[in-house]
Amino acid sequence: MFERNEILDVRDDSERGDLSCRLSLRRDVVPEVFNAHTPLSHILGDLDNDDIDPVLFASIVDEAFRYFQEMSPDFKLLPLDRYVVRHPSKDDDIGGFHGKGQGNMNAGGYFCYDDMGFGTLLNKDNIPNIRLRTYELARNYLHDSMHASTFRSMRVGPDGQEHRFQYGINFRDFDNTSFSAPDGDDEGRFVNLNIFMEGFIQKIIGDFIREKAPEDHAFFTEPGNGPDNPDVSDRERAVWADITEPENSGDVLPEAQPFIDFVMAPTARYMNFWEFEFETKGLGSANDLRRIYFHAMMSGDLSDLRQAYDDMIGIDNAWDTLFRQDAFTSDLATYTSSPPASPKDDYVCVFPFGYFST
Ligand SMILES: [Zn+2]
């Protein structure tokens, strides 16, 4: 979860690290961040809280867990005491995924070296609908759970330090040169793979919520229930649009535009381009291809993904031909055929401030 400056800082810094894990290097901010937050387990256990509806939250997350775990058994939810939530700090801050707090790191995102997610609630003053605030928190929790479940492997570099080598479907040299180039193209044939992973999870969570909540979707969008419904404000309609169609919400939710420009638009172009190819070549549905991406990200096993691109492009080693930049020098061969046994499970730091145990 990022404010524009955060994203650009990450990107300008030689494309080092994936978007979420780069931020984790800023560990100095964590104690301050932590003090303003409440563990999700506490919020869900307090049935009298008026921030979110715990029963609705549990039903969304439970159904999403089963849906996404069916796409890849490596998908796991972050433990409820490893996802912490705060209220927006300013009256004019809408909060949520695009809230102002993200920019100065008062909130936001998954910290892989602490194995914790940080979220911000929507502002009750702007968004009085408690169901909407619940959906927003659910998507942000699912989003960070997907970051937490994304496969990563570590290796020791020439400097004697541990370096992350693989994160999902992307890789890093010891000097942090990325397997995939920083920029995509206008057509959507290729995209930076870290940007894609960030946008892809936002997109599939949005599609899931839209399809699984038709009554709420109608309430927030349809004429009669929507635009002329005095119970739903323009801001609430905009937030629902962002949850369910995060690549297209900029017109109604200006706070979302930087994220759309940098992450969602190139991701949507890329997804559209290859879903069309996949379908027209008779290889399966768009959902089949999404399942291949998701399983490759979660498991670290890229074999089905590589096969799909060989089949779509009609050459061997098509994935590497499309994505690998010349500057990347590491040898993938020993990793891609047989991924190392999930070192992510061994790489969980004890949160250093005494509140949690691992
Ligand atoms: Zn993210």
Image (tube, helix red, strand yellow):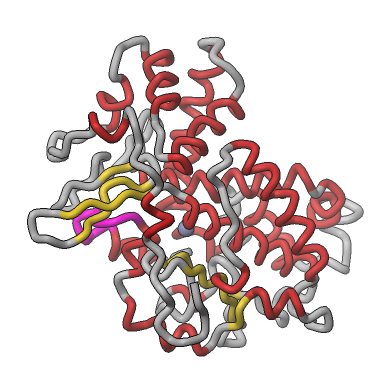
Task: Check the image and name the residue furthest to the left.
Answer: 158
Q: Residue at image x 59%, y 81%?
A: 86
* Quarter occupied by residue 112: bottom left
Picture coordinates of residue 48, whole percent (x, y): 83, 83
In the displayed structure, 227 sits above or below 34; it is: above
Q: Nearer the viewer, residue 343 or 4?
A: 343
Q: How many marks?
A: 0
Picture coordinates of residue 122, whole percent (x, y): 65, 74
Q: Nearer the viewer, residue 43 or 311?
A: 43
Picture coordinates of residue 39, whole percent (x, y): 61, 78
In the displayed structure, 334 sits above or below 308; it is: below
Question: Can residue 139 be seen in the rendering of this structure?
Answer: yes
Q: Is residue 17 magenta?
A: yes
Q: Residue at image x 41%, y 87%?
A: 31
Picture coordinates of residue 191, whole percent (x, y): 35, 38
Q: Residue at image x 55%, y 33%?
A: 290
In the displayed structure, 272 sits above or below 193; it is: above
The boundaries of the magenta stretch are: 11-18
313 to the left or right of 324? right
Q: Nearer the viewer, residue 99 or 254?
A: 99
In the displayed structure, 168 sits above or below 2; it is: above
Q: Residue at image x 64%, y 49%?
A: 206
